[in-house]
Image (spheres, rainbow, N blue to C red):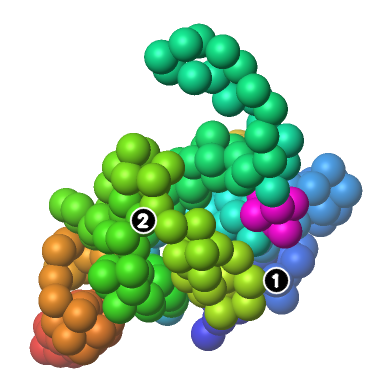
Amino acid sequence: MANDYMKDYVNSNSGYDMTALLGGAVNGSGSLFSDYASIKNGSYRKLMKAYCAKQEAEKASVSGDTAQKLTMMTSSADALKKSAEALSDPSLWQKKKIRKKDEETGEETEIEDYDREAIAKAVKSFVDDYNTVVEQTGTSDTESVLRQAVWMTDTTEKTQKLLSKIGLNIGKGNKLELDEDALKKANINTLKSMFSGHGSFADKVSGKAGSISRAAASAAAAAKARATYTRNGKYSNTMENWLSGTVDKKVGDKKTEKDRTKDTIQQAIDKREKEKAQQEKKEQEKKEKADRV
């Protein structure tokens, strides 16, 4: 049956009659030589890819993210991991010789202190990357990505009290809001405990960012595998058109810890199950209609 389907598919979507290569008879016009040429120039391989991709697409979920979107998520998560690791750099938390200007006299003196400007810059970079990841994953329809992102925002919410002491607060859409003045005045030991060393807030976010990156990269590879070739041999991601739908509850929605932990992931799973059931019902009704005819 699959072979018959393949014959119909390649014959209707190409300029070649592939019957001979798929088990049919060779006609007197020498189509076998034409088919051989199609193999030689790569057309047959492209048609085979298109056939296999279509078969996989028919089994795929009716919702999901495009490969391009998932690749962007991977890149953003990698940037967050890098900025989180930068905060754990021991050199950032060592005292340095700094020139300080007296605001009243204008006199400059050299003192040994922590480089608050460098710390603030590193934290700002971290916050920007964190918010980018939250924004992108908040619109994701990929369950594995959404799950990891929810866990990351849960980690942040559980640390909210300590974060507020150093000028970081959770704002709209679960994004972080930075008060640079409060950050520069924060107790240095509190800053160290939040951003430096194993088990710190930055270390935990770095781990979650890595998980998001891997989940997005894996999903992107799967999405690319489902892409097909056009009849002219051009590569096109048709899954962008085939796949649709959104997850009702997102990482970027402001929820309580319990709501997000229990509901967000379950909502995504339930929706996919519902869509799958609806699809199966449509297919069953179509089959019954065909049987009656």
- Say left or right for 217 vs 40: left
Residue 1 visible (yes or no):
yes
- In front: label 1 or label 2: 2
Quadrant of the image occupied by residue 53: bottom right
Magenta residues (range): 89-94
In the picture, the disc for residue 14 is: none
At label 1, which amino acid type do we have?
Leu
Q: Is residue 162 above or below residue 71?
A: below
The secondary structure making up most of the magenta span is helix
Instruction: Name the secondary structure under disc 1.
Output: helix
Which residue is found at the position 28% from the left and 47% from the top? 177
User: Please, what secondary structure does the residue beneath circle 2 have?
Assistant: loop
**Residue pointed to by mark 2:** 166
Tell me the crowding category of disc 1: few under 14, some 14 to 19, or many 20 or more residues within 10 angstroms, Cα based. few
Residue at (17%, 86%) from the top-left corner? Answer: 258
Q: Quadrant of residue 116?
A: top right
Tag 2: residue type? Ile
Q: Is residue 293 visible?
A: no
Q: Nearer the viewer, residue 196 or 130?
A: 196
Residue 148 appears left or right of 9: left
Q: Position of residue 69 (x, y in %)?
A: 45, 49
Give yes or no for residue 260 being in the magenta stretch: no
Q: CA distance from mark 1 to mark 2?
A: 69 Å
